[in-house]
Image (cartoon, helix red, strand yellow):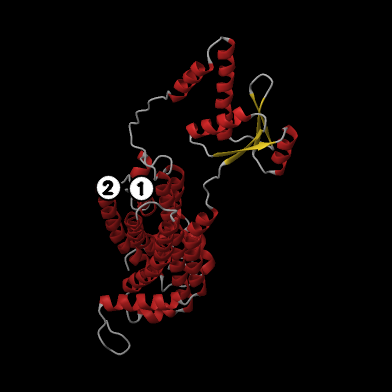
Amino acid sequence: MSDSTGLELGSREAVALVAAREIRVRIRSKAYLITLVITALAAVALPIILHLVNLTPGPTKIAVVRSDTALSATLRATAAELGQKVTVSTVADHSAGVAEVGAGTVSVLAETGPSGSIQATVDKTLGDSTRQLLQVVDQEQVLGAQFARLGIAPADAQRALGAASASQVQVTPLKANDPQQGQHIIIAIGAALLMYMSLMLVGQIVAQGVVEEKSSRVVELLLAAIRPWQLLAGKVIGTGLLGLLQIGVPAVLGVLVGVGTGQLSISLGSSLGTVAWALLWYVVGFAIYAMVFAALGATVSRQEDVQGLTFPAVAPLILAWVVGISVVPSDPGSTLVTWLSMLPPFAPVLMPMRIAMGVAPAWQIALSLALAVVFAVLLLRFAARIYRNSVLRSGSRVPLREALKAA
């Protein structure tokens, strides 16, 4: 095999030349650059917006009539015991309190009714935490009134109420609670989303590029100098590197900004480790799906035929994404997810999610990687055969059975 200058061109050099050509052509594409910039900006903007907005709710504002000083003190004390944040202000009378509720100055007007129970006035609805606070205070006041009717001294009644409030149910958890579970879920879903979108978008670019070269007959010139499998491997590697850039830049930027703004309390090393695993699985997943996209793209000659042809091939990718977002956050140890994450077509999406959630043992990760690599190597043989037998044939679609026949 030789190039146009008559010099011998080895397999490695041929693949490298094709990959470099693919990168030069695709990286100049406006669509690729715009997508890269948008995803990077979105990854940076999200933690910054969450930091600026500060989603932690502020204290609940409660108004109490000035004459009801005992209720005001009880609300503050009980809220502290329940761990709730409240601010209690005083108003002149009921009408003034209703006016403040209507204006949105306070969330609720709390008053002691004629029977001794709490009466609350709100604009629309009463929040669950505020309802719990008022319910506890109401029960304390009702019990206090009952104690008074029974002739029990206020000090004794207060001690009894304090003892009752201090009594708590003893809970023995079988599994340790992870306070960072929510952040692990966010990282897992983010990794899966980037993986899914990149494999779908960049995979389509591979298929469309094959059809473009085939319809313009550029492929005939390329195959005059190199072998079909070298052209296929070069296209996959070149486009894969661009996809790696497309998923790596937003992921790293998002983690760095998230840790910097405090939205991610997980250590930087742990977060970047999750990103590294996601990038590794992207490489494996792209090697699997890109070869399928390229091979199927070689069987058609029109761009409009690509979408319908490749949809069955990405069905496992879609299924993995659906299972991932619907099952993993609520049940990361699911048997279904565990087994699917071991199978090569599903592993590139599900295994990074399990790694991010911290539920994937090392042996499962190693076994899943080994199976995926072996599957990719076997797939290369069939994809190269389809590509070789189809890429030079124009006109109608080449049936897969015919494309798989040995040349």
Asked if residue 396 shows in the view, the reply is no
Q: Are marks 1 and 2 in contact (CB under 8 Å)?
A: yes
> Which residue reaches farthest bottom?
5
Residue 358: x and y, percent? 33, 46
Tell me the tag on residue 276.
none
What is the three-letter code of the residue carrying label 2?
Gln
**Residue at 52% over, 30% down:** 78
To which quarter of the image does residue 338 belong? Answer: top left
Residue 254: x and y, percent? 43, 60
Report crowding for label 1: few under 14, some 14 to 19, many 20 or more residues within 10 A (C-alpha): many
Tell me the tag on residue 354.
1
> Measured along the vertical axis of the image, is residue 35 above or below residue 118?
below
To which quarter of the image does residue 314 belong? Answer: bottom left
What is the three-letter code of the residue carrying label 1?
Arg
Distance from the alpha carbon under mark 1 to that under mark 2: 10 Å
Q: Is 48 in front, or is 10? A: 48
Q: Is residue 100 left or right of residue 247?
A: right
Q: Secondary structure at mark 1?
A: helix
> Which residue reaches farthest right?
95
Between disc 1 and disc 2, whose residue precedes? Answer: 1
Report crowding for label 2: few under 14, some 14 to 19, many 20 or more residues within 10 A (C-alpha): some
To which quarter of the image does residue 67 belong? Answer: top right
Residue 199: x and y, percent? 43, 60
Asked if residue 318 shows in the view, the reply is yes
Residue 321: x and y, percent? 44, 50
**Residue at 59% over, 29% down:** 134
Q: Secondary structure at mark 2?
A: helix
**Residue at 64% over, 39% down:** 107
**Residue at 32% over, 71% down:** 229
- Residue position for label 2: 364
Q: Is 289 in front, or is 81? A: 81
Image quarter of the C terminus: bottom left
